[in-house]
Amino acid sequence: MKPVWIVDDDRSIRWVLEKTLAREGIPFESHASATEALSLLDHGCEPPQVLVSDIRMPGQSGLKLLEEVKARFPDLPVIIMTAYSDLDSAVSAFQGGAFEYLPKPFDVDQAIELIRRAIDESMPQDGASEEVTLAPEILGQAPAMQEVFRTIGRLAQSHATVLITGESGSGKELVARALHRHSQYAEKPFVAINTAAIPKDLLESELFGHERGAFTGAQTQRRGRFEQAEGGTLFLDEIGDMPSELQTRLLRVLSDGHFYRVGGHSPIKANVRVIAATHQDLETRVKEGLFREDLFHRLNVIRIRLPSLSDRREDIPLLARHFMKKSARDLGVEAKRLSEATVLHLSRLEFPGNVRQLENLCHWLTVMAPGQLVEISDLPPEMRQSEANMPVSWEEALDQEALRLLVRGVPNVHELLSRNFERILIARALAHTGGRRIEAATALGIGRNTITRKIQELGIEDGHS
């Protein structure tokens, strides 16, 4: 097997991957820059089995390396790594033909599994396309959001129907716009309609248009949203609330590719990509007879599930700082900063309104907070109280401490918390037994030699932590 190439200017990343690949018996070579790797290929060096490259490096970027490599070796699997986990990086990587996208920091076992899969499943990719330079419209470093980014990237060259599900305020329209923005139809219209916000008797005309005289008040011919989105994307928000008779008409459009204006007799071709979204459980509504099963299957070709903000709490600091800057730009004022205590406090709060609620809060703070540094006392009264958010179990306390360390960027969180856990546990057992090690070991269910070694390693001799 040819070696795996690691290309990263970060020596520590190269070292970790080198040690792990060596342990797994996978041959490898390391290079500190894209320029170095390309130079070897320019001089006739055999290409690697798999290429693992960072995106942002001095000199040529990982995306430029990806472009050059895929132009020469279309079947070579390229795994793109980056600490900048944004949508555009993911889309650029997949549009350029990347095999997979690996956000840093990563679990080494996950990285090795990915490399092995790349070795086993060398998948042909299309040629490279231009790097996307648009500002990121969706932010998130949580694993669930990274999966959303990957899906958007994979769908960049597709016109398949997509169903987006998620709680209200989680960003479903942003995802729909991203799918359009990174598609081959990006220069064509993106037309959105909230099917729950339009009266039932007007919705048909809104979607399909009407002919003059089709009903009372129809003085002129009107193009509906399907025609307005010609060649582009039609986003049907809150599709779960669509009236049953219109569900039938929509199914017919998706099946036949044609529709009629209200009062019309000539078929019109529907040349649009349909993206639908809902906060409701469509499977349940199908069982209850409130949503057509055949329409559900037509819409559910590809599903993107958006996580709630409570399922991606690690993204709250990133989102909050972004929204503070955005609000300042919108209002034309200097951006205010959130103190570390405030960021940590926000990360512990419940946001039933999801990302939209957090954005509204940041806009409120930009207007109402008296100083440039926003403290907890500057939050709205209902968000200042922490008593309701205090942990009620040691698991919740551990969860909050892990979150605090991750927000601060503390390294080796697993090792730090594991040592503290053992130190507290053994110290408490020794205190309970009056310092008698054998009794403490028995109470904890560990061996005598183990507790002696742990006492020395953790610095809790004589039962003192």
Image (tube, helix red, strand yellow):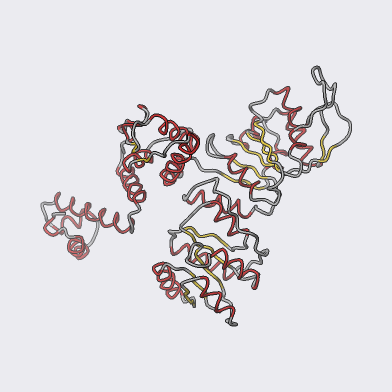
Q: Identify the residue at image location x=81%, y=21%.
A: 218
Q: Between residues 334 and 187, which one lies in front from this camera angle?
A: 334
Q: Identify the residue at image location x=73%, y=34%.
A: 225
From the viewer's perspective, tell me whether residue 47 is left or right of residue 81.
Answer: right
Horizontal and vertical percent for residue 357? 47, 33
From the viewer's perspective, tell me whether residue 291 is left or right of residue 82.
Answer: right
Farthest residue in the bottom direction? 44
From the viewer's perspective, tell me whether residue 410 is left or right of residue 126.
Answer: left
Q: Between residues 181 and 276, which one lies in front from this camera angle?
A: 181
Farthest residue in the top direction? 216
Judge whether 145 appears above or below 11 on screen.
above
Quadrant in which the N terminus is drawn? bottom right
Horizontal and vertical percent for residue 267? 86, 36
Quadrant in which the C terminus is drawn? bottom left
Horizontal and vertical percent for residue 79? 54, 65
Horizontal and vertical percent for residue 462? 11, 58
Quadrant assignment, res 293: top right
Tell how many labels: 0
Judge whether 250 appears above or below 44 on screen.
above
